[in-house]
Amino acid sequence: MLGLAVRSTQASDRVEKTLRIYKNKAVKLGLIPRAPEPFEHLDFIQTVNSGAADVVDMFPDTLIDIKPALIQLKKNAIDHRLGSTDQVLLVEEKLTNLTETLQEKRENLQILETSVQQLAKQLEDDKEKFAAEIGRMNEQIDTVLRRVTETESTIGNGRMTVDHEIQALRVRFDETQECLSKLSKDNVDKMNSILGFIVSYKEQIAEKTSLLKHFGGPSINLDVNYPPSGSGGNNTNMHI
């Protein structure tokens, strides 16, 4: 009896050890949670019926109680493996997409870096060209300012000369106007004198003509006194 009890105890220990091994593997693989909640309805404890008359009764077949749990465990493991495979495939697909995206981003970054380098070089060239252009423009501005200064000086000198000439012309104009005024007065006086002489001469002619008709003579001497000329004047006798 003692030997049978020892063997029974050893068999029970081996079963419990085997159960622990499978359970630990299942937990490590994530097939079952670490907490025993999903298997609370299963009794994994094996007892030895020491009062059984037969060895079969003393050592019942543990697979009868364990097999359903193992089948369910296997099914869960397969489902989990399939799910894990799908997840792995999904993760691999995402990883591939991310890798391609990363490679594309790297290529775009390389292109951008090249563009930035080209732009930096272009900017440096533009700065040099701009500085040279600014220098040329400053020289042109200095030249124009110098010409403007020279032109202003020339205009100032020319303006002074023109002012002097205008002043001289005004003096000459005043003198000429005064001379013309004097000549006009002299001419008017001379014209009035000549007109008076003509009127007087016509009166004398009319008088002499009347006398000539009255006396019926062949001729008559008419003494006409002309007005003095501008040079002092001389008396002139006119005979008709």
Image (cartoon, rainbow, N blue to C red):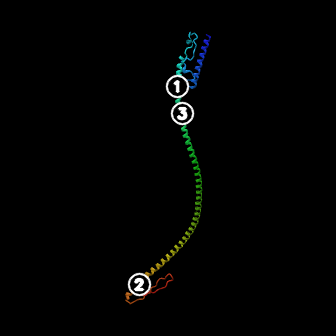
Q: Amino acid at mark 3?
A: Glu
- Which residue is drawn at the image coordinates 52% and 25% (left, top)? 78
In the image, is residue 113 above or below residue 74? below
Q: Secondary structure beneath disc 1?
A: helix
> Between disc 3 and disc 1, whose residue precedes?
1
Quarter of the image where one finds residue 13: top right
Q: Counting residues from the N terminus, which is met first, the one under dot 1 or under dot 2?
A: 1
Residues packed near mark 1 inside 10 Å, few (<14), some (14 to 19) or many (20 plus): few
- Of the residues shown, which amino acid type is indicated by label 2? Ile
- Report, in whole angstroms, how far the alpha carbon at label 3 lies from the one at label 2: 152 Å
Residue 197, given in percent of the width and then of the height, sits at 45, 81
Which numbered circle lies on residue 92? 3
Asked if labels 2 and 1 touch by Cβ distance under 8 angstroms, the answer is: no
Instruction: Depth check: give the residue in front, 224 or 112.
Output: 112
Q: What SS does tag 3 mark? A: helix
Relative depth, front residue between 1 and 19:
1
The relative height of residue 98 versus residue 79 in the rendered view (above or below) is below
As helix, strand or loop, the secondary structure at mark 2 comes to: helix
Residue 1 quadrant: top right
Q: Nearer the viewer, residue 42 or 220?
A: 42
Q: Check disc 3: other Cα within 10 Å, few if <14, some if 14-19, many if 20+.
A: few
Identity, as a three-letter code, of the amino acid under mark 1: Ile
- Label 1 vs label 2: CA separation? 170 Å
Task: Return the x and y of residue 60 as percentages of the image width and height.
Answer: 55, 14
Return the residue at label 2: 205
Q: Give how far across and how far down residue 15 sits, in percent.
A: 58, 18
Residue 106: mark in rendering: none
How busy is the neighbourhood of tag 2: few (under 14 within 10 Å), some, or many (20 plus)? Answer: some
What residue is at 44 percent from the left and 81 percent from the top?
198
Q: How much space separates mark 3 and mark 1, taking CA atoms?
A: 20 Å
Residue designated by label 1 = 78
